[in-house]
Image (spheres, grey):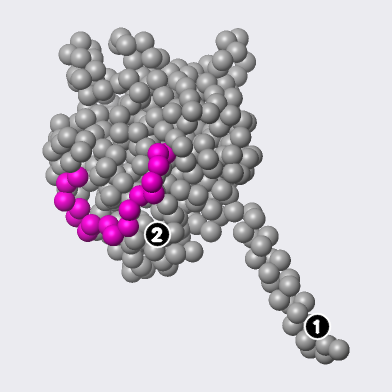
Amino acid sequence: MPTRRALKLALISFFTLLLATAGAAQKIKIIVDQDARGPGTSDQQALLVFLQSEKFDVLGITIVSGDQWLKEETEHTLRMLEIAGRTDVPVIEGAEFPLINSKEESERWEAMYGKLEYKGCWTEHFAAKRSTIYDQPYHAPDVVPPMDEGEPHIKPQPGTAAEFIVRMVHKYPGEVVLWAGGPLTNYALALKLDPSVATLAKEFVMMGGGLYADKGAIDPGAIDGRREFNWWFDPEAARIVLRAPWKKMTITPIDISVKTRYTQDMKDTIAKSGTPVADYLAKYSLPGYMWDEIAGAALIDPSIITGEKQLYMDIDIDHGASYGKTLFWKSTAQVPPYLRLANVQFDIDAEKFYRLFIDLMTRPPGK
C-alpha cells in the first residue's frame, strides 16, 4: 500500500498539474496581424506586447504590407522573434498589395486634392530618426534592404495569412481573438474565403480610424486627421471588415494613441534591464506616439482604458476627395442594417499603461 507521504506527493503533483492546465486554458488565443515595420517602431513594440505577456497564446503572426512592404516586414519580424526568444510563434505572409488602392491611385489623388505626408511603403523617402532610426528611400516591393539588426535564420510558415486565419477559427471556434495593427487586407480576404470567420471568432480588435483627431490632436496642418493610415491604405478591406457580423468589435483609433508618448526616459528605463528585447529597443526604438501598443495592452489590463463609446463605424470608399475617411455615427442613430456597433476607445490611464509596457519590455527571453 502507498504510504501517507507518497499519497501526499501524488496529490501535490495532481493539483500542480491541474493549476498549470487551468492557467494554460485561461490564455487568450490570438492571431496578431501587423504591417510590421522594423527594426523597432510601434509595430514591432506592439508585437512584443503579445510575445512578452503570459496572458496570450499567440497562434501566429500574420504580415500585411502597409508601413513597409510585406517581404521586408516579414524579415524584420522573424529576426525580432529570434532576439526575443520566441521562434515557437509561426509567421505567415499575407497580402502584398491592397484590394484596390495603389501607389498610382494615391498619386492621382494627391494631384487633385493635396499632398499626403505619410503613405507607408509608398512614401518616397523617410528621413533618419523620423519613423525608423535609418534613412529609407522608396524601393520596389520585392526588394528587401540590408537588415540592420541582422538576417533571420528562420523562415515564414508556408501558406497565406487568409488561409491561416480561416483554419484557426475553425480549429478553435469561439476562442480566437483576431487582432489587427495594420491595414485590414488579410482579414478582408479571410472573410471572402469564408464569411463564417466573423461568427467563429471570439472578438475582433484593431488599431485604426480617426474620429476627432482632425480638430488639432494630431499633425496640425495635415489634410485630414480622419484619413488614418491603416484604413486609408486599403479602404475597401476596411469596409469589408467593419461591416462583418463580429460578436464584438473593439477599435483603438488615433484619438487615443495621441494621448500617449514613448519617451526617452521610458527607453532608458527599459534599456537598464539588459535583456535581449531591451537591447533591441535601445538600438532601434524611437520616442513618439504609441500607436499600436495600446490595442494589445488593453487586452492584458482593460482598466488602462478609462473612456470609450459605442459607435457605428464605416469608411468612405468613393474614389474622390473623401476616399479613405473614417465615418461614424452615435449608437442611437438610425443607420442601415449593414453597419455594426463597435467599442471605440478614447481615454487612457497613460501612467498605468506606461508601467505595464515597461514591465513587459524588461522581462527575460521567452515566457
Residue 136 in picture, x, y percent from top left: 15, 42
Q: Is residue 354 visible?
A: no
Quarter of image, res 72: top left
Q: Amino acid at mark 2?
A: Thr
Single out the residue that lies furthest toward the front: 158
Residue 225 position (above or below residue 68): above
Residue 57 position (above or below residue 36): below
> Quick one: SS at disc 2?
loop
> Quick one: SS at disc 1?
helix
Image point (21%, 30%), residue name: 122
What is the total number of numbered labels drawn onto the structure image?
2
| Observer-nearest of 114 and 248 | 248
Image point (64%, 54%), residue name: 26
Q: Amino acid at mark 1?
A: Leu
Residue 123 in picture, x, y percent from top left: 19, 31
Residue 46 in picture, x, y percent from top left: 40, 47
Q: Which residues are magenta?
A: 144-161
Please check the rendered image and state whether residue 309 is part of the magenta-colored stretch, yes or no.
no
Q: Is residue 322 left or right of residue 108?
A: right
The residue that mark 2 highlights is 87
Residue 152 position (above or below residue 339): below
Secondary structure character of the magenta stretch overall: loop
Quadrant showing the N terminus: bottom right
The residue that mark 1 highlights is 7
